[in-house]
Amino acid sequence: MARLSPASGGEEVGMRTVVRGWRWRRNTLRRRSDVVEAWTVLVVSVLLFVVAPLVGVAAGLHAHDRAQTAAVAERSERHHVRAEVITDPTRRLHAVQGGREHPYQAMVRWTEPGKGPRTTSARVPAGSRPGDEVTVWFDTRGRSVAPPPDDVAVWQHTVTVGVCAAGGAAAVVLLGSAVERRIALRHRMAEWERAWARTGPKWTQPRT
């Protein structure tokens, strides 16, 4: 079996480099559409691996600031008490605010300093039973509300928005790239047809 010498191996590597980068070098096979496609691949790579992540980070930071501001506002407008569940919880039909689900409601009782015992219907965590002591939240009007989002919920919202923004940006880039490739393919085929129209007769005419 014939073996390639080190020199021939270097030539093979060099040939691979030339073949892979043929769109960037002047040659008789390169067409204008090939140059456009080469630049498009470079631009798409930058958009996917640099711009899209930056869009996700920017969107996530913006969402974090807004969510953190909203959480601080809700914490200032709501207060909580420790209360005893006195009835079996009933399931609510919809999710509630604050980014968390509190689908259950039950009668609770607690003692308010200076006002004595109080009983009202309030949102309670899932799995609550009569006799359990739970934390319930109320707004400034005394209405039962969901607890304000904590830091974990804020960061979950941040990551979700960031990932969605980055994914959306990447999807737009890939869609644009697909459209460009179809257009480039049509131009390439047209260029090859024009080139063949010029050189084809030289190959097809019978020799005298």
Image (tube, rainbow, N blue to C red):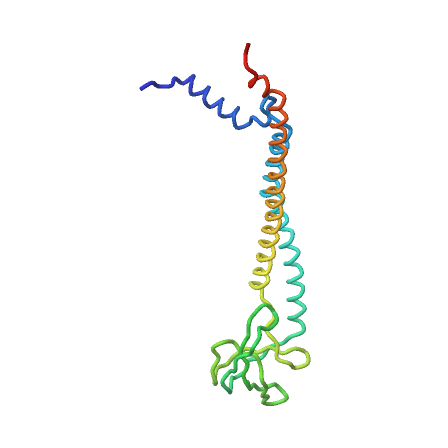
Q: Report whether 39 appears left or right of 86.
A: right
Residue 155: quadrant of the picture: bottom right
Q: Nearer the viewer, residue 19 or 99?
A: 19
Q: Which of 8 and 118 is in front in this view?
A: 8
Q: Nearer the viewer, residue 197 or 154?
A: 197
Q: Where is residue 64 in the image (x, y as percent from the top left)?
A: 63, 58
Q: Position of residue 87 (x, y in %)?
A: 51, 87
Q: Where is residue 207 in the image (x, y as percent from the top left)?
A: 54, 12
Residue at 63% x, 21% y is 198
Residue at 65% x, 82% y is 142
Identify the image quadrant of the C terminus: top right
Residue 33: quadrant of the picture: top right
154 up-or-down from 52: above or below: below
Residue at 59% x, 86% y is 120
Identify the image quadrant of the N terminus: top left
Q: Report whether 91 appears left or right of 175.
A: left
The residue lying furthest to the bottom in this view is 116
Residue 192: quadrant of the picture: top right
Q: Which of 167 and 37 is in front in this view?
A: 37
Q: Position of residue 197 (x, y in %)?
A: 62, 24
54 up-or-down from 200: above or below: below
